[in-house]
Amino acid sequence: MTLESIRSYGHLIQKFPDGSVCIDRQETQFSSIEEARNFIKNKKYSLVLESQITKDSYNEITDSRVASIIKEHHNIKVTDTLIESYIELASSQIFTIDPVVQKIRSLNKLDELVEGKLHYTLSDDSIVAINERTQQELNNLLSNKKEIVEYMRESKSNFFHILNTIKE
């Protein structure tokens, strides 16, 4: 039985008779609903701010630089829409084997969590980091295997399942 419950920023916050406070049915260290609500609010704000800073830093990379990277790796007509798509893909930090995205990401120093490692945010919101050599091996092995890349994007366990399978 709950004493009080509210929805805040898409999360269910509940206070129970024993004084415990839960967010989405997970017990927290907070003693009031207001503390939990402020925590969620600050967390959402931090994520939005971090995302905006990362995207803004990609906007500082010139379109001509992105166009030259695309031409270097692909024999296709470069349009403003294509440039925007590549910048959006790079800023999303989604796992990809496209060397254009990797090169664009390498130009953004804010995008590097651990020096010498490429990190990706997967669909389950987990973050994985691999070194450039592993990335190059994946590029070579998975160049025509879109389904495997999609599978790897889903979750950390899928990602490492493929890496371990490749090692064997």
Image (tube, helix red, strand yellow):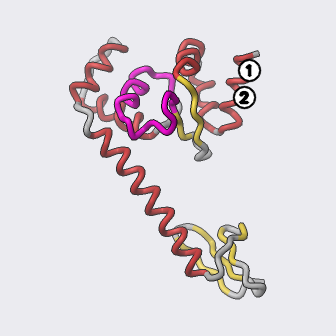
- Quadrant, the N terminus: bottom right
Task: Indicate the quadrant where residue 17 lies.
Answer: bottom right
Dots 1 and 2: beta carbons under 8 Å? yes
Quarter that holds the C terminus: top right
Closest to the observer, 113 or 2: 113
Q: Is 21 on the left or on the right of 128, as rendered?
A: right
What kind of element bears circle 1? Answer: helix
Instruction: Please rate how many residues cluster around mark 1, counting C-alpha atoms within 10 Å: few if below 14, some from 14 to 19, many from 20.
Output: few
Residues shaded magenta = 96-118
Give the residue number, with chain letter if any, for mark 2. Answer: 161
| Picture layout, residue 68 above or below residue 116 | above
* Nearer-the-camera pick, 158 or 103: 103
Give the left or right position of residue 32, taking residue 139 as reference.
right
Q: Dot 2, crowdedness within 10 Å: few (<14), some or many (≥20)?
A: some
Name above or below for residue 67 compared with residue 62: above
The amino acid sitting under disc 1 is Thr
What residue is shown at x 46% (from left), y 56% (from top)? 47
- Residue shown at 55% from the left, 12% from the top: 140
**Circle 1 is placed at which residue position?**
165
Q: Is residue 159 above or below residue 121?
A: above
Q: Farthest residue to the front: give it.
A: 115
Q: CA distance from mark 1 to mark 2?
A: 6 Å
Residue appearing at x 45%, y 36% in the figure: 112
> Is 34 left, or right, of 53 in this rendering?
right
Tell me residue 124's x, y (percent): 62, 45
Q: Inspect the magenta stretch and tell me whether residue 100 lies in it.
A: yes
As helix, strand or loop, the secondary structure at mark 2 comes to helix
Residue located at (66% from left, 86% from top): 4
Residue 6 sits in quarter: bottom right
Query: Tag 2: residue type?
Result: His
